[in-house]
């Protein structure tokens, strides 16, 4: 019997299926990343008396509780304690730990790919919803809950219900000044925060093929904000040449063999998806969120149309805005450029090209996604551009994306942010978050208000 055409997702799923109940499949997990929030799972493992099944496939990285200013850890025993807990658990179970001061540390979704730990065709899990990011390499990468983290620690396997498949096809090309972040916000606006729920998304089409790996990671990162736990792009030459520079990717003959396998990971012609959406990249403009959900965004040069609903009213009230007002020209109190969505080298280059020679009008914090990105940004003069523009340049980590490490936005303050979530309180109690691309955030920093990066006004 010949195999029916399969999607990229189905190929990887099948290659990892160990057993099935019909409703649930037992999957082999190739890589497991743990961060500070994984302590519950370590506690569960320890109380079960089981050892960690595969320490060599488990990697601990401190990111969520790392503040942009490490000196602050001395005054914050709670935050410092969370990092120490991860350090203790990883030491106890003898797994690789990238802790404070490690040159390879960073936000797990930035650091793991650049180390070559994220590879096409792998199943990768982490107790973090933005694990979707790693799908940019054609890996099947999912965020999992604490009980599942404990299960993976104990067995290196995971029971999962197979999601449906969804194709998001993007034709055309993104215009100058329009980025993967804008595309992600555009897609979520079109399909809604529940638009991909229960599905594994595959991004296809010329606009996606043309994206750099950094941009593909931004796109896959935001897939969770449309409800999908998986977002992926089939590996191609862009993927392969990116991986060749990473320290832990295979080398020599093993690499050649791996690359042949990686290039077999694509959706067969005629493979059926449960759901399909097509969008035109030419329709995408720089976007800014106005509300408290990532789907509440608008093209920067348009007034935002809102549906008359209770959810809209409460969003507007929280954000201190009126329906129909232009987002262009809205004053911001501060700017954050960072997070696993937009803190890679190309993001920082985008921000630096806007900030070069200027002076920020509002407090601006710029945080590299990893220590490697940070070192590279310093080596090529980006950090100096940021400092000369009056921005703060912090230690790499989750920082102000999430108010759990001391970096936060004060109540009522409006922050132009390159992160991925804008729900009430995300960046601090009462904080008002406007999601946008790094270039747009940098332009907001220079002007003290939201401007259109394409025209500067
Ligand atoms: C704290 C962590 C588990 C959480 C996630 O799952 O995504 C965080 O990274 C976030 O972005 O909200
Ligand atoms: S940077 Fe933000 S979104 Fe990404 S893992 Fe950290 S807290 Fe989550």
Image (cartoon, rainbow, N blue to C red):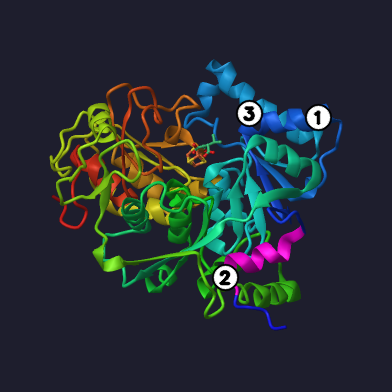
Is the magenta region chiefly helix, strand or loop? helix
Q: Are marks 2 and 3 in contact (CB under 8 Å)?
A: no
Residue 432 lies, with reference to residue 117, above or below; the image says: above
Q: Which mark is residue 46?
A: 1
- In the displayed structure, does residue 283 sit left or right of residue 40? left
Q: Position of residue 145 (x, y in %)?
A: 62, 38
User: Which residue in the protein does label 2 denote?
Assistant: 7
User: Which residue in the protein does label 3 denote?
Assistant: 83
**Residue range highlighted in magenta:** 6-18
Report helix, strand or loop for mark 2. loop
Query: To which quarter of the image does residue 53 belong?
Result: top right
Task: Indicate which disc, 2 or 1, sits on the residue closer to the N terminus.
Answer: 2
Q: Are marks 3 and 1 in contact (CB under 8 Å)?
A: no
Along the viewing direction, whichever of 120 and 65 lies nearer the viewer:
120
Q: Position of residue 289 (x, y in %)?
A: 28, 43
Task: Indicate which disc, 2 or 3, sits on the residue closer to the N terminus.
Answer: 2
Residue 47 lies, with reference to residue 179, above or below; the image says: above
Report helix, strand or loop for mark 3. helix
Q: Residue at x 78, y 49 (%)?
A: 56
- In the displayed structure, does residue 3 sit left or right of residue 215? right
Q: Residue at x 86, y 35 (%)?
A: 50
Q: Position of residue 160 (x, y in %)?
A: 67, 50
Instruction: Give the label, 2 or 1, closer to the camera.
Output: 2
Report helix, strand or loop for mark 1. helix
- Distance Cα–Cα, label 3 vs label 1: 18 Å
Instruction: Give the label, 2 or 3, closer to the camera.
Output: 2
């Amino acid at each position: 019997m010949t195999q029916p055409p399969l999607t990229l997702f189905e190929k990887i799923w099948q290659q990892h299926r160990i057993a099935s109940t019909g409703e649930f499949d037992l999957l082999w997990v190739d890589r497991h990343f743990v961060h500070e929030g994984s302590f519950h799972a370590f506690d569960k493992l320890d109380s079960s008396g089981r050892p960690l099944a595969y320490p060599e496939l488990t990697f601990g990285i401190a990111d969520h509780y790392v503040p942009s200013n490490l000196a602050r850890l001395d005054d914050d025993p709670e935050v410092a304690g969370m990092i120490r807990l991860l350090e203790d658990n990883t030491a106890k179970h003898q797994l690789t730990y990238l802790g404070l001061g490690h040159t390879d540390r960073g936000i797990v979704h930035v650091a793991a790919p650049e180390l070559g730990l994220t590879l096409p065709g792998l199943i990768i899990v982490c107790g973090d919803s933005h694990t979707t990011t790693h799908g940019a390499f054609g890996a099947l990468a999912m965020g999992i809950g604490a009980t599942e983290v404990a299960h993976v620690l104990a067995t290196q396997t995971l029971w999962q219900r197979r999601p449906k498949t969804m194709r998001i096809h993007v034709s055309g090309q993104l215009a100058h000044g329009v980025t993967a972040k804008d595309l992600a916000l555009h897609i979520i606006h079109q399909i809604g925060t529940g638009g991909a729920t229960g599905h594994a998304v595959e991004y296809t089409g010329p606009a996606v093929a043309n994206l750099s790996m950094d941009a593909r990671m931004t796109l896959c990162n935001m897939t969770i904000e449309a409800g999908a736990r998986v977002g992926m792009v089939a590996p191609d030459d862009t993927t392969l040449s990116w991986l060749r520079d990473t320290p832990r990717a295979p080398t020599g003959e093993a690499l050649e063999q791996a690359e042949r396998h990686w290039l077999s990971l694509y959706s067969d012609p005629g493979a059926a998806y449960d759901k399909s959406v097509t969008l035109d990249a030419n329709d995408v403009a720089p976007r800014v969120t106005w509300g408290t959900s990532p789907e509440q965004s608008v093209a920067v040069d348009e007034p935002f149309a809102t549906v008359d609903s209770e959810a809209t009213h409460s969003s507007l009230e929280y954000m201190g805005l009126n329906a129909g007002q232009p987002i262009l020209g809205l004053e911001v109190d501060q700017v954050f450029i960072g997070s696993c969505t937009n803190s890679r080298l190309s993001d920082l280059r985008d921000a630096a090209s806007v900030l070069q020679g200027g002076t920020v009008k509002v407090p601006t914090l710029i945080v590299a996604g990893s220590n490697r990105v940070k070192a590279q940004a310093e080596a090529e003069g980006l950090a100096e551009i940021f400092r000369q523009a009056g921005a703060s340049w912090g230690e790499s980590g989750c920082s102000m994306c999430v108010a759990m490490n001391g970096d936060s936005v004060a109540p009522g303050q409006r922050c132009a942010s390159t992160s991925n979530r804008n729900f009430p309180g995300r960046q601090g109690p009462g904080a008002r978050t406007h999601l946008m691309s790094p270039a747009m955030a940098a332009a907001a920093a220079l002007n003290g208000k939201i401007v259109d990066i394409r025209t500067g006004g």
